[in-house]
Image (tube, coloured by chain):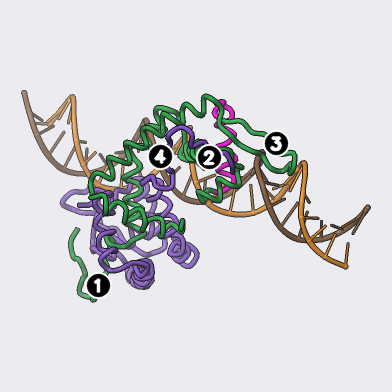
Chain colours: A purple, B green, C brown, D orange
Amino acid sequence: MTNPENDEKDEFDLRNFLPFLLNQAAEESSLEFQQVYKNRYGMLRTEWRVLFHLGNYGEMTAKDIGQRAKIHKTKISRAVAKLEQRRFLKRIRDEEDRRVERLSLTQAGHSSYRELREIAQSYDAKLAAQFTSGEVALLRMMLRRLAGMD
Amino acid sequence: MTNPENDEKDEFDLRNFLPFLLNQAAEESSLEFQQVYKNRYGMLRTEWRVLFHLGNYGEMTAKDIGQRAKIHKTKISRAVAKLEQRRFLKRIRDEEDRRVERLSLTQAGHSSYRELREIAQSYDAKLAAQFTSGEVALLRMMLRRLAGMD
DNA sequence: GGATAATAGTTGTTTTTGTAACTAACAAGG
DNA sequence: CCTTGTTAGTTACAAAAACAACTATTATCC
């Protein structure tokens, strides 16, 4: 490319624009881990997120997961169906309120979760190793704030 | 949700996992700006990215844009077609290498770019205002590193 | 120079997502 | 109770993304 056209007081650089930077960093930093749950476990992103939530926080409803991870209910519905099909989770109709399903992992689901968590943990460590521990702590704080997860 | 199942030395918290955190922050921080180019300009994300690249860096080829922003060529091809249709950009066949098209903005494209850039700039400032300027500088540096944009 | 491979970009097909409308169950007010 | 409104989750259809196969052009190298 040529002709930078910076003749019009253009202090703006796309490469510093936070939404763009965040997206690029998110994509790049997800890539390698994505290969694992995708190729090795045949899972979609929403599927491992549901798996992780159930593994990490225990029994939850679809709505709980959706609120916590800001995932739309239709995506969760489909992910749950797929995970159930693969016998990674089971649903129990809540008899107090029969609209609700209480979701939890099966043995198989739990064992996949443990494996993936292990991988995620060391992957996270690898990413974090590029910076000082103070920097990483600050980064996580800022990301949580930007994500509205305070 | 109940039953945290933290009985199995589970120091892992999904809410601190960098790829997850980055994705959440990216999505949340893009939302408001997305409304602008989507609802007000009828553009898709790839379309404004192409527009921004051409506005920001001047004449480029589809391949240039793809490499710089890590966007797949089919997505770019379709975005370019749409932007051309709306008379926001023009293509010039490179006579040195007739496989290549040199892309650049039209007047209309440039004026949309300027408007959107203005909005992007103040949106970025609003996001950045949540932190000290030192923190933001560090954040951008870290994101660039994570994005492999060094 | 002619076969073979590589490159820029496009098009067609399949997956995945987004959106809206739907079912079933519960809640609230009259 | 019984209409009206909400809520949990599903399903159907439309939009967008991913992936593979394609065309046209240029580069390689025997």
Q: Does the CB distance between marks 3 and 1 fall below 8 Å?
A: no
Q: Pick whichever, B146 or A109, lies toward us.
A: B146
Chain hosting mark 3: B
Measured in 3D between alpha carbons, the distance from the residue under mark 2 to the one under mark 1, in whole angstroms, is 51 Å
Measured in 3D between alpha carbons, the distance from the residue under mark 4 to the one under mark 2, in whole angstroms, is 12 Å
Chain hosting mark 2: A
Residue corresponding to mark 1: B10
Q: Does the CB distance between marks 2 and 1 fall below 8 Å?
A: no
Chain hosting mark 1: B
The label number, if any, that marks residue A4 in the structure image:
2
Q: Amino acid at mark 1?
A: Asp
**Residue at (18% x, 65% y) in the render:** B3
User: A53 above or below B12?
Assistant: above
Q: Which residues are magenta?
A: B72-88
Q: Amino acid at mark 3?
A: Arg
Quadrant of the image occupied by residue A12: top left
Name the mark nearer the viewer: 3 or 1.
3
Residue corresponding to mark 3: B93
Q: Secondary structure at mark 3?
A: strand
Name the mark nearer the viewer: 2 or 1.
2
Q: Does the CB distance between marks 2 and 3 fall below 8 Å?
A: no
Q: Pick whichever, D28 or C6, lies toward us.
A: D28
Residue corresponding to mark 4: A11
* Residue B66 on image: x %, y %: 56, 48
